[in-house]
Image: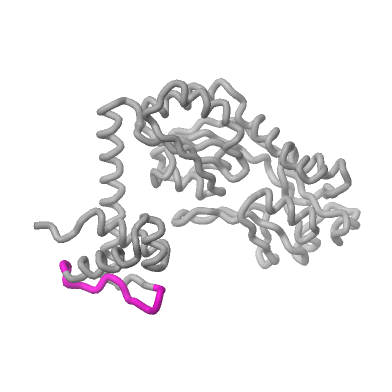
Amino acid sequence: MLKLSLDALQIVDAIDRGGSFAAAAKELFRVPSTISYSVSKLEEDLGVQVFIRSGPKVLLTAAGRALLLEGRSLLKAAQDLEHKVRRVACGWEIEFAIGMDLMFSPLLIADEIRAFYEVTDSTRLRTSQEALSGAWEALLDRRVDLLLGAAGEGPPGGGYVVEPIGSMQFIFAVAPHHPLAAVSHPLGKDDLIAHRVISVADSARRLPARTVGLLLGQDTLTVPTLRCKFEFQLAGLGVGFLPERWARPAIEAGLLVQKEVVEQRSPENFYMAWRAGEQGAALAWWIATLRKTNLLERLALGWEKESRLFGC
């Protein structure tokens, strides 16, 4: 009789990612005592210690780390099997998750969401947002089924299909009262290294984090969203590249100053992507529907709408 269950592996995985039994309980919608009992039962059945307990925080033992390393592969295989069985049974996915880069607001596909619900009521729809490499990781880890507005090239190894949806220009901007605003020549490394740059955090959990426009040794203020980066640059707390369509109204309103830099940032390419071999009806509907619209233009319009909120 097997002493290891998928439920136990899911609990161990949640504890490791959350750092505590309480965090795992919250994620799995259970009470902490149930999580604690499940771990104790697992350790008793296997005859090994899985976690080192130190107050509210817990750490995996060497045996626990080995268990989780292989266990995550089993969890992914089980999830893949569930998805396959459900698709075979009804054609429409039970749940369909759309992931967007943080630069892309889910509100921009509200019309498509409304139309989707008119086509089917058997699929639960979920949207989420990730940053940089985190968006690609969410697709590969099956946290999302379709990526919209994913920035930059996908990770090596394949396993997914990509369609380019266009590219965007980024410009370097600073607040009018920032010291770099008064510099007349194109800004080089020697000018920039002494000033703080605002950077959006990559949400990747295991893929290498991606950084854009950062210099080695430069002071960096990391923020959770592009909107937050925009706000902080308006406040003069740092500098950096911004989408031209977002920054332009602020520049015209005198709230930001565009600066020439020696090393310009190349235009950013954006993509729509999904896992190779997927054949669900919901995925097919979304791909066919979104191919009829200019996603990147909507992204730009969303940026312009955001900038107007600040009186630009």
Q: What's the residue at 16%, 72% (across, down)?
A: 47
Q: How many marks?
A: 0
Left or right, residue 64 beside residue 307? left
Residue 288 position, x and y percent, is 48, 22
**Residue lying furthest left:** 1
Comparing 209 with 301, the one in front is 301
Q: Is residue 299 above or below residue 227?
A: above
52 magenta-colored: yes
Comparing 169 with 232, the one in front is 232
40 magenta-colored: no
Q: Tell me the magenta residue range.
A: 45-57
Left or right, residue 42 beside residue 103? left
Q: How is the image coloured?
A: one colour
- Residue 96 sits in which quadrant? top left
Comparing 167 with 246, the one in front is 246
- Residue 19 sits in which quadrant? bottom left
Q: What's the residue at 46%, 26% (across, down)?
A: 117
Give the quadrant of the N terminus.
bottom left
Residue 60 position, x and y percent, is 33, 70
Q: What's the residue at 36%, 55% (across, down)?
A: 28
Is residue 279 among what the camera can see?
Answer: no
Q: Is residue 91 above or below residue 138?
A: above
Comparing 42 with 76, the one in front is 42
Is residue 159 among what the camera can see?
Answer: yes
Give the quadrant of the C terminus.
top right
Left or right, residue 267 beside residue 112? right
